[in-house]
Amino acid sequence: MPEVTRERTVRAARDEVWRVVSDPYALARWWPSVVRVEDVDEGGGAWTKVMRTPRGRNVRADYTRVAQQPPRRIEWRMELEESPFERIFSSAVTAIELSPADDGGTRVVIGVDERLRGIRNRLGGVWVRRAARRRLDEALDGLERAVGRA
């Protein structure tokens, strides 16, 4: 399944946007469905997102930062082993790239590469991509709000 990307220019300096996207604790302010972030290791290289499902249940997911080039790029991976998502995905990676925009704002590109496991890969790809596009649009909306009060 190909990577899904969304992009937007936000009205904030790149350093301000970087402070938000590189801080795991800030995810609760802008990433969709995140209620809180826990267990952030020293240096912010690993953390747990607690997310609320549409039915109101909390689900935990562990993440590890796999790349970082301040203030331009950050990438993290969902740790799937022994998680509720292990049966669904074979891999799930999110990347964010920031670059200066002509108007003084910041061009933000968020991409996800979510690989489905087994037969789901052939049957569910369209729905997963659609959900990813919606989630990334919501993340960009949240990021705009978060840097507006950063």
Image (cartoon, helix red, strand yellow):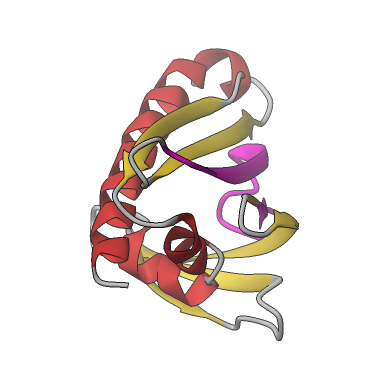
Can residue 83 be found in the magenta stretch?
yes
Q: Residue at x 70, y 62 (%)?
A: 64
Quarter of the image containing the N terminus? top right
User: In this rendering, would 16 be left or right of 42?
Assistant: left
Can see residue 81? no
Looking at the rendering, the stretch of residues picked out in magenta corresponds to 74-101
User: In this rendering, would 149 be left or right of 70?
Assistant: left
Q: Is residue 128 above or below residue 95?
A: above
Q: Residue at x 61, y 21 (%)?
A: 121
Quarter of the image containing the C terminus? bottom left
- Counting from the top left corner in percent of width and height, residue 12 is at 34, 56
Q: Quadrant of residue 84?
A: bottom right
Magenta segment, prevailing SS (helix, strand or loop): strand
- Counting from the top left corner in percent of width and height, residue 123 is at 52, 15
- Counting from the top left corner in percent of width and height, residue 132 is at 42, 33
The count of marks equals 0
Can see residue 101? yes
Q: Residue at x 41, y 57 (%)?
A: 13
Q: Nearer the viewer, residue 66 or 7?
A: 7
Q: Is residue 73 above or below residue 40?
A: above
Q: Nearer the viewer, residue 96 or 69?
A: 69
Q: Quadrant of residue 29?
A: bottom left
Q: Nearer the viewer, residue 59 or 41?
A: 41
Can residue 88 be found in the magenta stretch?
yes
